[in-house]
Structure formats: structure tokens, C-alpha cells
Amino acid sequence: MSFKIKVYDAEFYWENGALHCTDKTLFKNFKELLAAHIPAVVVMPDMIDYDDDLTDERNAFLAINGIFPVTEISEMPADEIMFADMEENRIY
């Protein structure tokens, strides 16, 4: 398991290459809110805050924390996942 995030009384977690949630209604609402989100560019020209791709672990982690105002992270993703596409000589 790579990350676990508690949102309200439910838990989102990444397991076997997919995002899961213990509350089906919250998961459905999350997907609807995510579909309505317009990604913002964080670093020109190629990084965005998050989009609706839930097949990417880093994106799913950022999306959960971006959609829900209060979360409790019980297990963080590995650094190599969170910083995989960061360029060494770029200032962020």
C-alpha cells in the first residue's frame, strides 16, 4: 500500500495500482468534483496541480488533498512517486 488518507469517516488508499475508498458515496462524489476541477498550471509550461486521471498515484494523492479541505494523511506516498517528474536543475 502506498498512501492512506482519511476524509471524514472514510479512507482513501492506493493499492495494487488503483485508488480505493471505504465509502462508495464519497468516492462517487469525489469523482464528480474532480471532473468539474479545472487544472491550474503550477510551473510553466508542463506541471499542473492535478487532473481527473485516477490511474496515476501522485495525481490521485494531490487530487484528494485538493478537493477535500480537511484530510488526515496516515501514510504518505514514497518520495520517488511524489517527485518522479521533477527536474533537478529547475526551481519550483
Image (cartoon, rainbow, N blue to C red):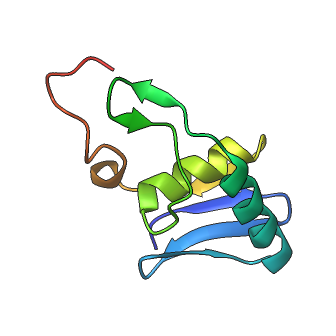
Q: Position of residue 24 (x, y in %)?
A: 79, 79
Residue visible at 37% across and 47% down in the picture: 82
Residue visible at 25% across and 44% down in the picture: 85
Where 61 sits versus 91, above or below? below
Residue 17 appears anywhere in the view = yes
Please state if 80 lies on the left or on the right of 34 as rendered: left
Residue visible at 54% across and 54% down in the picture: 61
Where 67 sits versus 21, above or below? above
Quick one: which residue is furthest to the left in this view?
Answer: 89
1 or 87, which lies in front?
Answer: 87
Where 27 sits versus 70, above or below? below
Quick one: which residue is furthest to the bottom in this view?
Answer: 16
40 or 5, which lies in front?
Answer: 40
| The quarter of the displayed image where residue 52 is located | bottom right
Residue 76 appears anywhere in the view = no
Please state if 68 lies on the left or on the right of 81 as rendered: right
